[in-house]
Image (cartoon, rainbow, N blue to C red):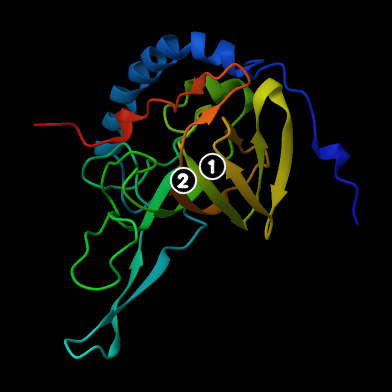
């Protein structure tokens, strides 16, 4: 077995603990909001013929279904183009942007899920990272980000979701960063099971990275003092009301 100790490093640029991150939550939300207008304006002016993820192809999504008498059929077969999670119109991420692209594959709305009948296509829509009512499946394309540009991001931030996440690296490589800057480098074929941990995806590889995620809603994590560790506010990813 290969020794992976070399993949574990301390990064002084990452906040040192969950408690300190909690104290900075209001500042981070304000910081995020300061970047939203510029990101959305760039999305509206983007050239749909050129994207930051031009070397990654669209994702073919096949969804099965049933006929009225219960016969198994193919209900949908199409190629989805990665979308800008900050664009209400579902446009592509502008060329040169640090914003990851989202390909939203499917989202169930009940538990257990209903595997037949009409369903709502989540792709190209602004939405929270996880939904407490069901399972979310998406592919995220992470562009390479210089270390000094991490704080300028409004989507790829240090965050916690109230979920158990399964992540599979499809292309490229990326660092998964946890508390105190501890990190592991993940490469094509690697799988992570993330159990409600606060984390950051940090792509310093110099190339694009594509990750497949399945997010299953879960209970909140409780620390040793009985305090509930809250999920990160990502409402800026949801479609604006009105």
Query: Between residues 101 and 168, which one lies in front from this camera angle?
Result: 168
Look at 79% across and 29% down and name the residue there: 9
Viewport quadrant of the C terminus = top left
Furthest residue toward front: 226
Could you tell me residue 220's position as x and y percent? 47, 32
Is residue 1 left or right of 100 when viewed as pictured? Answer: right
Separation of disc 1 and disc 2 at Cα? 7 Å
- Which image quarter: residue 12? top right
Is residue 193 left or right of 186 when viewed as pictured? Answer: left
Look at 34% across and 54% down and name the residue there: 49
Could you tell me residue 1's position as x and y percent? 91, 57
- Which image quarter: residue 171? bottom right
**Within-10-Å neighbours for mark 2: few <14, some 14–19, many 20+:** many
Does any portion of residue 101 appear in the rendered image? yes
Q: Dot 1 corresponds to which residue?
A: 143
Could you tell me residue 93's position as x and y percent? 37, 43
Using the image, tell me which numbered label, if any, was put on residue 52: 2
Asked if 193 appears above or below 202 in the picture, the reply is: below
């Amino acid at each position: 077995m290969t020794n992976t100790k070399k993949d574990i490093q301390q990064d002084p640029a990452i906040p040192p603990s969950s408690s300190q991150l909690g104290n900075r939550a209001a500042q981070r939300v304000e910081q995020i909001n300061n970047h939203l207008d510029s990101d959305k304006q760039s999305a509206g002016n983007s050239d749909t013929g050129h994207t930051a993820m031009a070397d990654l192809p669209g994702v073919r999504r096949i969804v099965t279904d049933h006929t009225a008498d219960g016969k198994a059929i193919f209900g949908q077969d199409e190629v989805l183009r990665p979308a800008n999670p900050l664009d209400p119109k579902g446009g592509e991420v502008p060329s040169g942007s640090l914003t990851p692209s989202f390909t939203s594959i499917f989202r169930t709305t009940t538990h257990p899920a209903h595997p037949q009948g009409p369903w709502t296509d989540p792709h190209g829509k602004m939405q929270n990272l996880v939904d407490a009512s069901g399972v979310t499946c998406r592919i995220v394309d992470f562009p390479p980000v210089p270390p000094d540009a991490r704080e300028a991001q409004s989507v790829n931030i240090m965050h916690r979701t109230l979920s158990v996440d399964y992540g599979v690296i499809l292309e490229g490589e990326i660092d998964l960063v946890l508390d105190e800057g501890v990190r592991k480098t993940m490469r094509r074929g690697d799988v992570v099971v993330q159990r409600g941990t606060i984390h950051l995806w940090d792509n310093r590889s110099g190339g694009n990275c594509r990750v497949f995620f399945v997010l299953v809603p879960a209970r909140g994590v409780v620390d040793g003092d009985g305090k509930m560790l809250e999920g990160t506010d990502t409402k800026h990813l949801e479609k604006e009301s009105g």
